[in-house]
Image: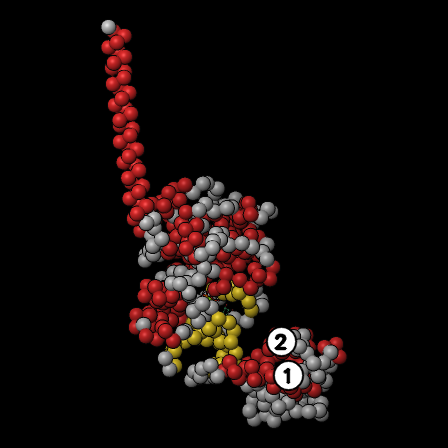
Amino acid sequence: MSETDPKSKVVPSANDSSGPKSDSGLGGNPNSESGGSRSGSASDSLLGRLVVERGLATQAEVDAAFSALRAATNQTRTFTDVLIDGQIVTRRQLARLRTESESDKSVLRIPGYQIIRKLGAGAMASVYLAKQLSLDRLVAVKILPHRYSTDATFIERFYKEGKAAAKLADPNIVGAFDVGQVGDQHYFVMEYVDGETVYDRIVRFKRLKDRDALTITRQVASALKHAHAAGFIHRDIKPKNIMITKANLVKLADLGLARAMSDKKSAEAERHQAFGTPYYISPEQIRGAIDLGPPADIYGLGATLYHMLTGRVPFEGRTPKDVMQSHLRKELIPPDQVVSGISEGAAEIVEMMMKKAPRDRYQTAEELLEDIDLALAGQPLRYASRTVDVVGIASEIEGNADSEIQTSDKSKAAFSGLAMALIAGLSVLCGVLVLTLILLYVFLKG
Ligand SMILES: Nc1ncnc2c1ncn2[C@@H]1O[C@H](COP(=O)(O)OP(=O)(O)OP(=O)(O)O)[C@@H](O)[C@H]1O
Ligand SMILES: [Mg+2]
């Protein structure tokens, strides 16, 4: 927390070189006395961000500091000088920020990159904010756990997917920049998205308005259109893999990674801890299908849209297995039954996206885009309409025979035994009935 009253903070003229010099560069220009850089470098932006994130100052104060720095005629003056002289942060606070940042940096050294701080961690990896030194730009670096380094199939796939993903250029896809290995750890360098995930947004607002949820979904569908055309199936569409920039541009993350991660051997090894609770997984992925097509991603995006609209995941369960069983068998509660006021168009789109059988869903992202545009324009949809997904449910139950979470052999045997007994019973009953009729006929005739 701030050690000074934020209201009393003033940003002095940047020409004012009086006052104490900063002793905390936090990655700034090492030639400067204060260690900060002259103006607006990536390190300065990061420092400004950290100061706001830690609640030491408001964004307006940091912006004012940047303006003051830009207007400065004194060339030796740095961003940290302006922050300290303006009593926006104290030297102690800057030193503390630097210590935190250093402790994260010590995690790993990647040639060509300066690790700045941890951005987050998922079940399988950690993601760091870093500076790519050659281009002086901020990037996000995903570091994979050690255990992957021994799996040759995974590594081969990781590099292959990384290279392919790097060829994709789309405003709605987080750019893939580099893959590499340092020591026995593999890393994936990607575009840094300064914003939040859809998951963060759901947590913040509980649920999103129809129009906002559809607009986000539209942008992901557009990313999928591009990715699918290039032969990618994402396989892990979920709120945590969809990022939103401060300008509300939606970016799909981890393209190319999911396929490497879903390599059978790695997936087996991860099954209990890292697979996580599969709230957004398609029925065909649960069954272990290998020939996944665009409808698998459309299902994941449908489950994400459901979560955005209702504030609830489509299927809850005590264990991942329970949730997966529900994806396979349980009828979806229409989103507008969970929350009233959701438009019929949005509800119909979700239901079509989440049909149990892939053939009953939108077949392509283009079809989905068309319906979303119609819904946003308040017009009737072209593809989605409300019907009970009987065929889908039946085929999924049937498909369950191949499923990893199939009915056990024992219960199947018990079921067929019961069926046989029933048939036998019915045959005897029919026989008795026919015999009775014959006897009755003979008796009456006689
Ligand atoms: N390109 C990026 N730019 C900025 N932040 C990112 C970026 N990629 C990931 N993050 C942050 O790092 C966090 C961890 O990402 P990661 O992909 O490892 O896991 P996840 O997608 O959140 O969850 P899971 O492990 O279940 O897939 C994300 O939630 C997000 O906050
Ligand atoms: Mg992710």
Residue 93, label in figure: 1
Q: Is residue 383 visible?
A: no
Q: Tell me if mark 1 has few (under 14), some (14-19) or many (20+) residues whose alpha carbon lies within 10 angstroms of its own.
A: some
Write the residue at 36% across / 79% down.
184
Front residue (pair 429, 208): 429
Locate residue 49 relative to residue 123 in the image: left or right: right
Q: Earlier in the sequence, mark 2 or mark 1?
A: 2
Cβ of mark 1 under 8 Å from ligand 1: the answer is: no
**109, 49: nearer the viewer:** 109
Q: In which quadrant is the N terminus drawn?
A: bottom right
269 left or right, relative to 36: left
Could you tell me residue 75's position as x and y percent?
A: 63, 91
Q: Is residue 58 above or below residue 17?
A: above
Residue 96 visible to the viewer: yes
Residue 264 lies in what quarter of the image? Answer: bottom left
Whole-angstrom CA distance, mark 2 to mark 1, is: 10 Å
User: How far across and down, in percent of the image, does residue 432 sit?
Assistant: 27, 22
> Marks 2 and 1: CB-CB under 8 Å?
yes
Looking at the rendered structure, the kind of residue marked 1 is Gln
* Residue at 61% over, 93% down: 33
* Badge 2 amino acid: Arg
Q: Secondary structure at mark 2?
A: loop
Label 2 near ligand 1 (CB < 8 Å): no
Residue at 56%, 89% in the rendered image: 29
Disc ID at residue 54: 2
